[in-house]
Image (tube, rainbow, N blue to C red):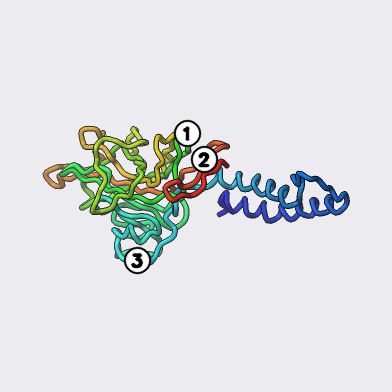
């Protein structure tokens, strides 16, 4: 699959030598000299490089391993989120699914312990509980961003979501809203979990029920702080979460109706032409692309 970065590399590798040849011909023919030294080959080449570099940066996904393809080892059970490169479980027991897993692990693709679904792209996806009727339960995953989000920049943010349709004994199928993202300047962990205090910068108010397709949910977002991490889940309590029951929800048989969602293709890109970039917390020089 050709990503924007792959396309950029192909364009750059073919166009830049051609432009370089033209510039060398021009300079060898006219021997331009100036005391200001602003029309040198190196400087013009650098400007050409910045032009293509700017295009590349505008298309960069700031979510590392946003489709969950890279992993440290093939999973043996569905709860091994930390085996997915860059990602971590930070609240309870979310799941990682990959085509490499055997069917008996409940982490296989397309059929696993939470339903049947092929990845939106590639070979893997995540899964998490966003609502549980029997007791308060949320599952949340997170990662460190490739680059800091800056106030004033506008970011286009999206992910694909599909509802899992299998629970214990095939009872308890449900759906809920409020699935979204929280951005922070610090890192959560299982020993320092995020609070579900009815706050997330972006979230979906619609109750997603589709189990066949990958539903696109997307936002345009202007951050108010220098955010370095993103977390995905439902950060709202039960009284602020709308739910519906699907299928057999006889509470005398299975009292714990839950809403479970597969997650794939998480993307955050700066949508402007003058996006401030860098990582000031690490002393990196800031610049505009």
Q: Is residue 164 left or right of residue 100?
A: left
Residue 1 lies, with reference to residue 47, above or below; the image says: below
Quadrant of the rendered image containing residue 198: top left
Identify the mark nearer the N-term, 2 or 1. Answer: 1
- Towards the viewer: 250 or 153: 153
Nearer to us: label 1 or label 3:
1
Identify the mark nearer the N-term, 3 or 2. Answer: 3
Q: Residue at x 77, y 46 (%)?
A: 39
Residue 78, position as x, y percentages in the image:
30, 59
Local secondary structure at mark 3: loop
- Towards the viewer: 275 or 131: 275
According to the image, label 3 marks what residue? 102
Residue 270, position as x, y percentages in the image:
51, 40
Q: Label 2 to label 1, Cα distance in Å? A: 8 Å
Q: Residue at x 37, y 66 (%)?
A: 74
Marks 2,1: beta carbons within 8 A: yes
Q: Residue at x 46, y 47 (%)?
A: 279
Q: Is residue 137 left or right of residue 18?
A: left
Q: Is residue 68 left or right of residue 254?
A: right
Local secondary structure at mark 1: loop
According to the image, label 2 marks what residue? 276
Q: Label 1 to label 3, Cα distance in Å? A: 46 Å
Specify the label residue 168 is tagged with: none
Residue 8, position as x, y percentages in the image:
62, 50
């Amino acid at each position: 699959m050709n990503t924007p970065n792959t396309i950029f590399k192909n364009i750059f590798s073919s166009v830049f030598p051609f432009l370089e040849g033209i510039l060398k011909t021009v300079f060898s023919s006219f021997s331009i000299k100036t005391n200001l030294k602003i029309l040198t080959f190196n400087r013009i080449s650098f400007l050409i490089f910045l032009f293509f570099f700017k295009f590349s940066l505008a298309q960069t996904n700031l979510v590392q391993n946003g489709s969950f393809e890279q992993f440290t080892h093939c999973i043996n059970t569905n709860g091994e989120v930390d085996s997915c490169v860059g990602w971590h479980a930070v609240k309870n027991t979310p799941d990682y699914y990959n085509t490499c897993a055997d069917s008996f692990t409940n982490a296989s693709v397309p059929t696993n312990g939470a339903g049947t679904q092929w990845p939106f792209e590639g070979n893997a996806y995540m899964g998490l509980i966003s609502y549980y009727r029997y007791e308060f339960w949320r599952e949340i995953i997170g990662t460190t961003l490739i680059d800091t989000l800056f106030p004033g920049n506008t970011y286009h943010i999206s992910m694909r979501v599909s509802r899992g349709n299998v629970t214990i004994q095939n009872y308890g199928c449900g759906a809920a809203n409020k699935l979204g993202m929280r951005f922070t300047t610090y890192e959560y962990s299982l020993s320092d979990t995020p609070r579900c205090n009815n706050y997330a910068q972006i979230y979906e108010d619609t109750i997603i029920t589709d189990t066949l397709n990958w539903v696109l949910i997307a936002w345009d977002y202007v951050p108010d702080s220098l955010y370095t991490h993103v977390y995905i889940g439902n950060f709202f309590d039960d009284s602020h979460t709308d739910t519906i029951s699907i299928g057999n929800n006889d509470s005398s048989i299975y009292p714990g109706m839950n809403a479970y969602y597969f997650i794939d293709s998480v993307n955050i890109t700066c949508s402007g032409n003058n996006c401030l970039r860098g990582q000031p917390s690490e002393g990196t020089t800031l610049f505009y692309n």
